[in-house]
Amino acid sequence: MSTAFKQLSVRQVTAALWRVTIGNPPINLVDYETLAELHALVCDLESSQEVKVVIFDSADPDFFLAHWDLAAKRADDTVDPPPTWTDISLRLARAPFVSIASIRGRTRGMGDEIALGFDMRFASIERAVFGQPEVGTGMIPGGGSLERLPLLVGRARALEIVLGADDYDAVTAERYGWINRALPDLELDAFVERLARRLASFDKPALAEAKRLLSRDAVPAADDLEASNEAFHGAFAWPGTRARVQALMKRGIGTRGELEMHFGEILAELLPQARAA
């Protein structure tokens, strides 16, 4: 591996099995650096002839990936346009290796959309929480959930998830098809490791070709993903969005507090604050 990371800790368990642990304190917010590191990681993975399986987990048991950092800014010395999640997620979908998310903690908004971009998702019953809160904040999702959720859970449940903007436990997420399985927390690591090692014992051409064929009708179109991303950024100009974001700032968004721990519940209380902002 040729890349040094700040937010990602990469361990080659074997040549065929890698583990990537996400750590961006205080609550694993997603920002431009997260995307840049994921892009570099995918480049490293694509250049490996041996890697067959990659496990993604979090260093924070309360937050897998919280959501997009509303205060995120590109570095001043950045010349090239930053890598987009659209490009990274499509490369992951088409890559000749299998990506598996082992999820503990809150996984909302862009954090959930990154999880949706992996090939498989397994989650802790006791610790995992999922949500797409954007509509409740006056915006819309822009990182792929509008495209990927209907493929996984169906249109009606995708509407419930996105329009309702509430939090969901891992058992419900499994029942909906949002994740592969919900497992007791004490069993999660062993299950994911066992599955990953099993896959890593198989031939890479067979894994890659089966994945490619299974993905023919299950990967969103790049144009659709880009359209949602553009709509997401455009939503920041809506008057209601600005008011709700101000209310979220007052409640401590991005910090390790009650809002981030209980986002879905607190969103229902935002309206009076948003009107007053």
Image: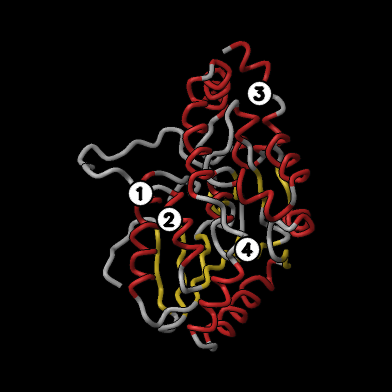
Q: Secondary structure at mark 2?
A: helix
Residue 121's disc is 4
Q: What residue is disc 2 on?
A: 88
In the figure, is residue 176 to the left or right of 232?
right
Give how far across and how far down residue 22 sits, in percent.
Answer: 46, 59
Q: What residue is disc 1 on?
A: 83
Question: Is 162 situated above or below 181?
Answer: above
Residue type marked 3: Leu
Dot 4, crowdedness within 10 Å: few (<14), some or many (≥20)? many
Distance (Cα) linking label 4 and label 2: 17 Å
In front of the other: label 4 or label 3? 4
Q: Observer-nearest residue: 57 or 137?
A: 137
Give how far across and how far down residue 215 sits, in percent.
Answer: 58, 65
Instruction: Say which label, 2 or 3, has the lower sequence index.
Output: 2
Q: Secondary structure at mark 3?
A: helix
Residue 75 falls in image quadrant: top left
Dot 3, crowdedness within 10 Å: few (<14), some or many (≥20)? some
Distance (Cα) linking label 4 and label 3: 31 Å
Q: What residue is disc 3 on?
A: 270
In front of the other: label 4 or label 2? 2
Residue type marked 1: Pro
